[in-house]
Amino acid sequence: MECKQQIRDFIIENFLFGSSDAPFGDDESFLESGIIDSTGILELVSFVEERFDIEVKDEELIPDNFDSVGKLVGYINNKMNKIH
């Protein structure tokens, strides 16, 4: 399954309680739209580390990496390219 779809599925299942009635765009801010709060970001980080087998460093926990589907996909792709 594509990285973007895995992220979307996780967010729908864990933060929107399985409801896809409230769709969100790839560039929509998780925090500004209320999809994910600051505690939810930690859940998202755990998911990313486990699912994509990467380590998220403290200094990488910034909105430019984790505040939308698009930003998160870019971050994951960059991390995975550095590993391989």
Image (spheres, rainbow, N blue to C red):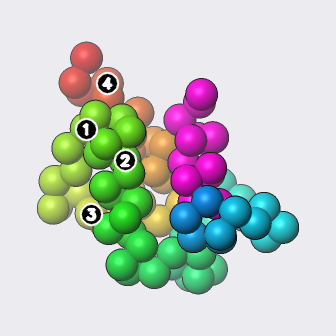
Q: Mark 3 touching mark 2, by CB under 8 A?
A: no
The mark found on residue 48 in the picture is 2
> Considering only order in the chain, which callout, 3 or 1, is on the residue closer to the N terminus?
1
Vertical arrangement, residue 56 with respect to residue 74, above or below: below
User: SS of the residue at dot 1?
Assistant: loop
> Considering only order in the chain, which callout, 4 or 1, is on the residue closer to the N terminus?
1
Say if the magenta span includes residue 5: yes
Amino acid type at circle 4 is: Asn
How far apart are the alpha carbons under marks 1 and 3? 13 Å
User: SS of the residue at dot 4?
Assistant: helix
Q: Is residue 79 visible?
A: no
How far apart are the alpha carbons under marks 2 and 1? 7 Å
Residue plotted at (57% across, 70% down): 15
Q: In which quadrant is the N terminus drawn?
A: top right
Vertical arrangement, residue 16 with respect to residue 78, above or below: below
Q: Residue furthest top?
A: 84
Q: Which residue is mark 3?
A: 61
Q: Residue furthest left?
A: 58
Q: Which residue is mark 1?
A: 54
> Magenta residues, as a range?
1-12
- Determine the main secondary structure of the stretch shown in magenta: helix
